[in-house]
Image: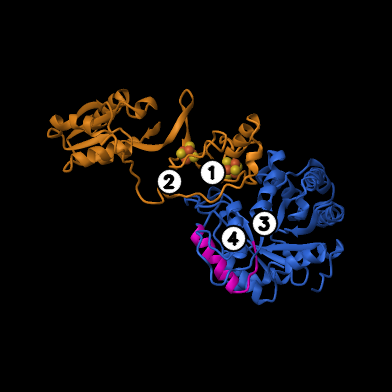
Amino acid sequence: MKTDSRLEKVFASGNLAVTSEAGPPRGADPEKVKEKAKHLDGYVDGVNITDNQTAMVRMSSMAASVIVKQMGMDPILQMVARDRNRLAIQADILGAYSLGINTMLCLSGDHPKFGDHPTASGVYDIDSVQMVQCVRKMRDEGKFQGGADITKPPKMFIGAAANPFADPFELRVLRLAKKARAGADFVQTQCIFNLDKFEEYMKMVCDMGLDEQIHVMAGITPMKSAGMAKYMKNKVPGMDVPDEVIKRIEGVPKADQAKEGVTMAVEFIERLKECKGVHGFHIMAIEWEEQVPEIVERAGLYPRPEL
Amino acid sequence: MITAEQKPIEEIIEYIAPYDRILLVGCNECVTVCAAGGRKEVGLLASALHLHSLKQGKTVDIKEITLERQCDPEYVEELVSLIDSADAILSMACGCGVQTIAGRYKDKPVYPAVNTKFMGASESQGIWAERCKGCGDCLLGVTGGVCPVARCSKQLMNGPCGGTSNGQCEISPDTDCAWRLIWERLKALGMEKRYIEVMVAKDWRPAGGGGPRRIVREDLT
Ligand code: SF4
Ligand code: SF4
């Protein structure tokens, strides 16, 4: 084992891993963090704590991660290259690890243009791949990015994001290969709605032997309504929502659309359990954390393994 | 070249309002090419300012001159004979030109009449786009001749990010995704393998992270 991360142990045990996420509040109330996280307690192996998601200021992901840790759960600290240079990134990793956080996700971050501080300048000193490289070096070589020794190196289990759907499609697998090469242990994918395309992607992943190098967690998002499905199709960059998905949700009365969305999510998981190279599921129920337990149970992923 | 755009006329008027005699100085280089501060624009701005002051019932004395290169002390010296007859200088050159004047004529206020934008190239008639951020350690040789520093909105060295949409950058459908362009070039050159190499964290010192930059050429000094 490289780390004490629960996620690493689940992967090593050969079980399918389950993660979910909780966005910190736009305010300083710790109860808001706990409220969201408690829905997930016992149903997941890690909870992503987002980092100024969609470029909107929120409670820092490190603070919210510590709150979740104090609840006895396993936070996955998200960190975006948009808001920190390499000094701040490494300082935060040392701090997070000293407070018991052992799993993190390295991201570029949405552009400031989309957030509530569009006049801000993004930092982008290093990119997400270089961040992975940096965290791996800290862990495995006990050295800072700049080369100096670390007295007690932080042992982070290293995640990254993957979008199998953004174009150019042929580059998507190579980009995953690059993240694996830089030292990522696992990736969580963008929400999957186009399963055929995702399976095609995973076939390329396995053909390159990447499934042996990196754990791919399939991103699952239950649709709450036909409106949400359309929004995701048309407004979210790099999202692939086929028309059949929208039609299926539209096909049921409004009051039942959320239920249908959950059923679809469960079906997607059932189908992708069979997909070679998929080692777990990342369930992103956006502002709908209370739905996650039902999905986990119905998809046959509950109880989580005792390790 | 360095591109620029004229400032809003209201801002220029506000700058020069306290003065009666203005020396309006254009530049014959980049700002001429991008039609922001050459001889022609100097003439147009002078007329606009005259018109404005007439409307206010005032007269302002504007002397027009366009230097060969405003970022070159040799040419800025040409203003010596005119400087005493002006209360302020309005420069239509890029920020380099404005500062060369400010450095030479220390007791004369100098105001910029343009916003200096970026180092770019002409895409088509009337359209210029950013191409280089002067990072001081050019990567174009490994990125297929497309700059990730200036043309990727997140300055990614190992892109593309997940936001590319129909080959365009997530920030705007008018902006090409730099990494789509890089990939297309690498493919056309048969250099796809190069993509898989991780580009390590960039040294930003030559890009300005090491403080203001200078070039000293011993052979020329
Ligand atoms: S790599 Fe640096 S020097 Fe080369 S074009 Fe880009 S910014 Fe300019
Ligand atoms: S879409 Fe392309 S150009 Fe825009 S930030 Fe992402 S990688 Fe860079």
- From the viewer's side, name the closer residue of B8 and A37: A37
Label 1 amino acid? Answer: Ser
Residue at mark 1: B153
Label 3 amino acid? Answer: Ala
Marks 2 and 1: in contact by CB < 8 Å?
A: no
Q: Residue at x 38, y 25 (%)?
A: B33
User: Badge 1: few (under 14), some or many (20 or more) residues near its Cα, within 10 Å?
Assistant: many
Label 2 amino acid? Answer: Ala
Residue at mark 4: A137
Q: Which mark is residue A184?
A: 3
Q: Which mark is residue B207?
A: 2
Marks 2 and 3: in contact by CB < 8 Å?
A: no
Label 1 lies in ligand 2 vicinity (Cβ under 8 Å): yes
Q: Are marks 1 and 2 on the same chain?
A: yes
Name the chain under label 4.
A
- What span is in magenta? A86-104
- Please tell me whether mark 3 or mark 4 is closer to you in this view: 4
Residue A226: x and y, percent?
76, 48
User: Badge 4: few (under 14), some or many (20 or more) residues near its Cα, within 10 Å?
Assistant: some
